[in-house]
Image: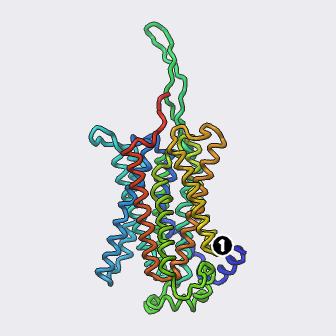
């Protein structure tokens, strides 16, 4: 069924393959750097002074980067004729490339604040990466109005690749681990050899520096793709005229297939909904999305070191990689096999919450969670981590489709609920990790 839909959809597209590929490469730059940092977290967490608290810092810093899209939206509101997508896009790409390069060489640089060492440089670069990625969500989409409507899917495919590609690179990198080795020391004065345990770092297949440099190259590819889409003659053939850009909704019906046909792919979500979503139904789903975002985007990422790292760097690394792979896969499933009832989406939310509670239990019992040191314990942790991502992403995409059919204002409310949930989750987790003593990390001594 899904393959039939995919085949039918591809046949209905009116696109140039090279331009479509450039659109995907352009879209890949949307969340590339942030996804890259989180998938690389297992390789850097033990080498920075924050140690297991690092993810809570990064999660909270990421929420403040929403100032970028807020500024853009305010400018668009105050100055409706403000059209600077090209300038802002080049700024996003330039800052993304620069931040990645600087992180490659300075990610271990620390500064003293009070009496403690902190990764101030890395935090600054992470904020800049987050600022670029968050702002891209309100800049890249308006640019796509320049191209035929069928190219919009290429942008979303590229956005999925922004999670998948860094995960595959990290999979080839492996993860650096620390181990305790019995080391001998010879005293040349009395010719006596003593033995003691010390930490030895086992390096990954290639260093963190090379990973960040790879991200910078990929962001550069995004910039080159944007320039070609904007100015290359073979891409200009796929541009819409000014009149067509203004009448984009009508073009969607006449080019690349009927808009009604495109919507029927997802209208199974709408049950007897001829007059929009009822108010109670809308508020219910807004609460669901706020709750899902609280867990998936704010709270759980902040405590993932405490729930995952006790099972070893390898298990932590695998959960981070599979989580990034599961994200675009869940979107793919939601697009071609959308939920057919509210009952299904409620079930996915509840089951995802069950997985989240299990991860919270693991974090709460850190550094000695259930089945620690066993293959079964590692498997359950990874399964719960990936499972909640699949279920929550599937729920969010299906609900977003439902709200899209209800109108622009509903989508605005949905976006607000998503950001509110993520912010609250990050704040609660930051307090839990850094203010209270509820979560404990494992001692580093041999």
Name the foreground residue: 225 vs 273. Answer: 273
- Residue at left 45%, top 7%? 190
Q: Quadrant of residue 418?
A: bottom left
* Rendered position, 184 above or below 297: above
Quarter of the figure that contains the N terminus:
bottom right
Task: Identify the residue at the far front of this view.
Answer: 280
**Colour mode of the rendering:** rainbow
- Residue at left 37%, top 70%? 69
Side of 70 where 405 appears, left or right = right
- How many numbered marks does the figure carry? 1
Q: Residue 364 at x, y = what percent?
A: 50, 44
Q: Residue 439 at x, y = what percent?
A: 45, 42
- Residue at left 49%, top 46%? 305
- Residue at left 54%, top 61%? 163
**Mark 1 — residue?**
337
Side of 244 where 69 appears, left or right = left
* Rendered position, 174 above or below 265: above
* Rendered position, 58 above or below 186: below
Label 1's element?
A: loop
């Amino acid at each position: 069924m899904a393959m039939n839909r995919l085949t039918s959809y591809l046949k209905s597209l009116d696109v140039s393959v090279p331009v479509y590929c450039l659109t995907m490469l352009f879209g890949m730059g949307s969340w590339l750097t942030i996804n890259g940092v989180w998938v690389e977290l297992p390789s850097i967490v033990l080498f920075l002074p924050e140690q297991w608290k690092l993810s809570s810092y990064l999660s909270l810093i990421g929420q403040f980067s929403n100032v970028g899209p807020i500024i853009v939206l305010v400018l668009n509101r105050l100055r409706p004729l403000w059209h600077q997508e090209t300038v802002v896009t080049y700024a996003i790409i330039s800052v993304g490339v620069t931040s990645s390069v600087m992180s490659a060489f300075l990610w271990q640089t620390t500064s003293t604040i009070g009496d403690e060492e902190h990764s101030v440089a890395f935090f600054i670069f992470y904020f800049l990466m987050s600022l670029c990625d968050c702002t891209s969500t309100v800049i890249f989409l308006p640019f796509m109005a320049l191209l035929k409507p069928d190219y919009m899917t290429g942008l979303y495919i590229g956005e999925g690749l922004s999670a998948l590609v860094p995960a595959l690179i990290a999979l080839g990198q492996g993860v650096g681990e620390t181990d305790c080795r019995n080391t001998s020391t010879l005293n040349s004065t009395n010719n006596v050899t003593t033995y003691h345990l010390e930490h030895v770092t086992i390096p990954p297949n290639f260093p963190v520096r090379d990973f960040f440099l790879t991200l910078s190259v990929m962001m550069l590819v995004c910039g080159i793709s944007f320039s070609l889409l904007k100015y290359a003659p073979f891409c200009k053939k796929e541009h819409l005229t000014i009149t067509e850009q203004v009448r984009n909704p009508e073009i969607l019906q006449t080019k690349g297939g009927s808009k009604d046909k495109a919507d029927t792919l997802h209208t199974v979500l709408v049950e007897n909904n001829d007059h929009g979503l009822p108010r109670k139904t809308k508020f219910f789903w807004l609460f669901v999305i706020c709750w899902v975002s609280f867990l998936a985007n704010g709270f759980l990422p902040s405590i993932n070191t405490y729930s995952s790292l006790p099972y070893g760097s390898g298990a932590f690394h695998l959960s981070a990689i599979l989580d990034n792979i599961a994200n675009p896969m869940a979107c793919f499933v939601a697009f071609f096999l959308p939920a057919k009832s509210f009952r299904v989406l409620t079930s996915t939310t509840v089951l995802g919450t069950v997985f989240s509670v299990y991860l919270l239990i693991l974090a709460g019992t850190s550094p000695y969670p259930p089945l620690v040191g066993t293959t079964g314990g590692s498997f359950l942790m990874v399964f719960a981590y990936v499972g909640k991502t699949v279920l929550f992403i599937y729920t969010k995409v299906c609900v977003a489709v439902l709200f899209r059919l209800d109108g622009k204002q509903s989508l605005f409310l949905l976006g607000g609920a998503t950001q509110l949930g993520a912010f609250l989750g990050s704040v609660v987790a930051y307090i839990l990790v850094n203010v209270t003593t509820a979560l404990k990390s494992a001692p580093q001594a041999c």
